Structure formats: C-alpha cells, structure tokens
Image (tube, rainbow, N blue to C red):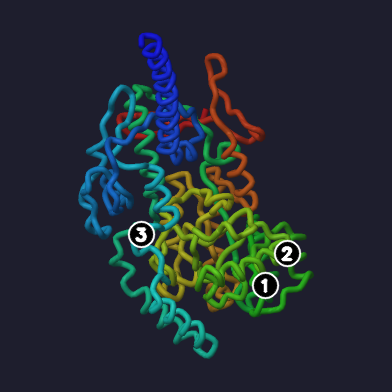
C-alpha cells in the first residue's frame, strides 16, 4: 500500500506540473491575445502589456464608453451595455483596476478593435435584410435610365439623417486609436514607467501619410485621366487610378501603360460597378475569381469595391495585397458604418488602407458644397493623430464646372502641408510595403539603449511614448 501511495503521489505531481504548465501557457496566450491589437499598433516590447480579464465576459455584445468620447462595441463583465450607440452611458474606463503591474480589464481590447475595424457593431452594414438588398437591386437596375438629378435626389434621401448619427463620430472617428492610446497610458501607469520605446508609425520619421486615389467610373472619366495626371504632376503628386475592368468602358494596354510609365498606380475597381458584388457569398466568390484574374493581368496589387460596398469577412477570397474599400466614417455613403481608425490594419493577409476623408461626389452633390473646408478639417484631425489622409477624387466629376479649381486648391494645401509638417505622399502600394515591413519589426534592448529589430529597418525610426502629466506624448528618438 505504501509503495502504491508513493507512485500515485508522483503521478499526481507530474500531472499537476503538466496542468500548471498548460494553464500557464493558456494564460500567456490569453494575455498575448488581449494585448495583440495594442502591440500591432506600437511594435514595442511585449512585456509592457500585462493584461488580464477582471471576470467572465457577457454572452452578448453592446455599446459602452471608454473615456469621454470613445464609443465601443464588445462584451464586458459588467453587463451594463447599451443596445444603441446613444445608450452607451457607462464608462468602463472607471472599472479598470491595477494589480501588481497588471491591468485588470472588464473587456477584451482586441475584440473592441476588431469589432470596430471590421464593422461588426450592430447595424453597421446594410444589405443584411432581403428588403434592403431588393431596394439596392432596384436602384441599380433603374440607374442606367436615371438622369443625374434623379440619382442625387435618391442618394440625398438615403443620407437624410446623417447628422443625427452619433456613431461613428463625424467628420473623423479615431475611436480605435483613442482606445489603444489610453490602454498604453494605463499600462505605463501600472508598470510605473514614464517612457516607452516603439517603432514610429511612418518611414523616415515623417509625421503622417497622404494618399490620393482616382476611381474612373465612365468613359468620359477615362478620357480625362491624362489631363488629371498632368494636374497631379504639376504639384508633385502621384496617385492610384481605380479601373473598372468590365462593362463601363474599354480598358486598353495603352491606358494601363500610360499610368505606369508616368509613375502612377493601377487599382482594380470592382468588376463592373453594378452594386451587386456582395449580394451573396456565392456571387462574391464567383466574381472574386474573375476580379483576381484582372488583378494579375493589370499588374494591380490593390482592390476597391464599387460605391464602397464591402464585407471584410469575405476578403480571404481576394488575391490582392491590399484593399481600399472601408471608410473611416460612412454616414454619406450607400453602405453606412466605418472602421473608426485613421491607420492601416490587417484583415487576415489583406492590408486595409481605409478611406479617411469624404469623397468628392459626396462633398459636391450630397452636401452640395464647393469648398475645401471640410477636407481641411478632416486633414487637421487626422494629422493630429499621425494618421493616413486618403482621398477618392473622381476624374468623372472633376469635369463639372469649377471642380478642377477646387481640386487644385486641395492639392496646393496638401503640398504646403507636406513641406511644413513632413507628411509622406505615398502610393497605396508603398503604404502596403511599409506597413508589412513594420509589422515584422520590434523594439529590443541593446545594452543600455534600444534598437529596432527586423528584416527591413533602414527607414524605420525609434520613437518614445511619454506620460506627460497624464497625457500621452510622442517623441522621435
């Protein structure tokens, strides 16, 4: 009996060691998962982010605040969740506690970020109901016989309540960026550190990034592309042109070569721009195979859906390096929602380069304004967050009275801003290259200092996030 008891105790000890190791690995995996979004943003030393859940999360999702302005959508351990953004009255920042250098959180930060970036929050995407899909089909069926006035009236009716939408926040929503900044600041306070090294957001230490794109929707727009390249070149701007490969106009090899020979970029813009790309998953998969073929034929690395219709859950079928279909705030677009960030981010293997400013069509014909004031306001808000300022300006609509002058005014403003504030004017393919390179970088200790580790670090810059009187301040190293 005694011998058997000893054997059982030894087996029990080994089993307990295995169990403890498994629990430890699971806890570490959970911690890494909780901190994944913030580490992806900063590419800093991972041991700073020591997160744990305060308790079991609710089975349902809802809205809450995290700070005075950030409205989030996720599960929490408190159960005090709003069913609509305007009912997000409880601030869960008040429920975060510190314990031994750890942040005890009432939510999963990565879940918050993914729910916003992928527009998983309630009511974000249209087209869920059969009635909505029917209305969209009817519109696109009759669109060819509608004149411009009729189309504008329908679009204005669709967007009639845009000013009443509390979320995402107009004219630029930085909720994702605000949440991650606040969590970094809280982590620094929990660890008792005043400064954290990280990989700066953009190459060569530039303050922000700017990208211009031109979606070509008609034969008239195609024929204006040469003139538009001249306008861009006159101010040292290179842009990407979104080409509809079927149904709208003839796409010749000479047209594609003209873009590439002059240093511009070609994107695939939908298949035929009929508004039905995302009617069903089967239809999307069928069209995606054709779209992928055009991408290879045209030498295009990027894609954008017509009218910014989207379902990021299906993007795995796209054979493109990046997508440019998700707006930051989509109050005026046919499909409402918004990703609530001014930074690129990955959806699986696809890099999302969000549209962060209002389209020219919405500005001219929905808001009915002929001014750059809104663009300038959005630019200021985005640059303040060191984000990506990305535009869609159509050659089709620039041919209307006075539109080219307004566009030139915008470019002049951007050119001046780029010179004064060190803003990188980049093609989408260059942004894709940089963001992929940065995603493989990290900050490591090197004696008494820090350095950036990675395969391609020549253009990377070390920066420091500092806690200055309770506020997060960035400084380049």
- Image location of residue 115, percent across then percent down: 40, 52
What residue is shown with label 2? Answer: 298
- Image location of residue 341, percent across then percent down: 43, 51
Question: Is there a contact, CB below 8 Å, between mark 3 and mark 1?
Answer: no
Q: Is residue 156 above or below residue 63?
A: below
Of the two numbered discs 3 and 1 in the rendering, the one whose residue sits closer to the viewer: 1
Q: Alpha carbon of mark 2 to alpha carbon of mark 3: how far?
A: 36 Å
Question: Is there a contact, CB below 8 Å, between mark 2 and mark 1?
Answer: yes
- Image location of residue 226, percent across then percent down: 70, 69
Sequence-wise first label, 2 or 1: 1
Residue, x 50% and y 67% (percent of image)?
308
Residue, x 36% and y 28% (percent of image)?
188
User: In terms of depth relative to the viewer, which is nearer, 272 or 161?
Assistant: 272
Can I make out residue 410 in this image? no
Q: Alpha carbon of mark 3 to alpha carbon of mark 1: how far?
A: 33 Å
What residue is shown with label 1? Answer: 245
**Mark 2 falls on what kind of element?**
helix
Q: Residue furthest top?
A: 2
Residue, x 49% and y 72% (percent of image)?
361
Residue 170 shows which numbered tag? 3
Sequence-wise first label, 2 or 3: 3
Residue 182 shows which numbered tag? none
**Mark 3 falls on what kind of element?**
loop
Of the two numbered discs 2 and 3 in the rendering, the one whose residue sits closer to the viewer: 2
Sequence-wise first label, 3 or 1: 3
């Amino acid at each position: 009996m005694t011998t058997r008891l000893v054997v059982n105790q030894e087996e029990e000890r080994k089993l307990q060691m295995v169990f403890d190791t498994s629990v430890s690995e699971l806890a570490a995996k959970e911690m890494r998962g909780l901190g994944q979004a913030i580490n992806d943003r900063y590419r800093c030393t991972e041991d700073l982010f020591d997160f744990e859940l305060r308790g079991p999360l609710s089975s349902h999702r809802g809205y809450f605040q995290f700070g005075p302005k950030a409205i989030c959508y996720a599960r929490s351990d408190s159960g005090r969740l709003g069913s609509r953004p305007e009912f997000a009255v409880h601030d869960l920042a008040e429920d975060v506690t510190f314990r031994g250098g750890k942040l005890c959180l009432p939510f999963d930060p990565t879940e918050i970020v993914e729910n916003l970036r992928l527009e998983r929050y309630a009511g974000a995407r249209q087209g869920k109901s059969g009635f909505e899909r029917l209305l969209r089909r009817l519109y696109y069926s009759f669109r060819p016989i509608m004149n411009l006035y009729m189309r504008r009236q329908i679009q204005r009716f669709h967007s009639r309540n845009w000013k009443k939408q509390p979320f995402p926040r107009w004219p630029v929503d930085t909720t994702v960026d605000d949440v991650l900044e606040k969590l970094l600041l809280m982590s620094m306070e929990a660890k008792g550190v005043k400064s954290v090294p990280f990989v700066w957001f953009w190459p060569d230490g530039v303050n922000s990034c700017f990208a211009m794109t031109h979606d070509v929707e008609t034969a008239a727009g195609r024929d204006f592309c040469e003139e538009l390249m001249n306008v861009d070149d006159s101010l040292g701007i290179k842009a990407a042109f979104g080409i509809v490969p079927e149904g709208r106009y003839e796409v010749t090899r000479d047209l594609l070569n003209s873009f590439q020979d002059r240093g511009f970029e070609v994107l695939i813009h939908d298949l035929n721009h009929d508004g039905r790309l995302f009617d069903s998953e089967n239809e999307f998969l069928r069209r995606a195979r054709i779209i992928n073929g055009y991408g290879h034929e045209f030498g295009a690395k990027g894609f954008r859906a017509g009218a910014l219709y989207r379902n990021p859950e299906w993007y795995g079928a796209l054979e493109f390096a990046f997508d440019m279909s998700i707006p930051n705030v989509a109050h005026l677009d046919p499909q409402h929602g918004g990703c609530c960030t001014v930074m690129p981010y990955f959806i699986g293997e696809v890099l999302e380069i969000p549209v962060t400013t209002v389209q020219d069509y919405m500005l001219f014909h929905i808001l009915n304004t002929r001014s750059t004031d809104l663009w300038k306001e959005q630019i200021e808000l985005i640059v303040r967050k060191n984000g990506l300022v990305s535009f869609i300006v159509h050659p089709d609509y620039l041919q209307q009275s006075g539109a080219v002058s307004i566009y030139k005014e915008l470019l002049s403003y951007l050119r001046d801003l780029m010179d004064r504030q060190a803003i990188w004017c980049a093609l989408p393919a260059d942004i894709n290259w940089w963001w992929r390179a940065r995603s493989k970088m990290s900050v490591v200790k090197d004696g008494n200092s820090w350095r950036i580790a990675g395969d391609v670090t020549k253009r990377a810059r070390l920066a420091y996030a500092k806690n200055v009187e309770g506020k997060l301040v960035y400084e380049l190293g």
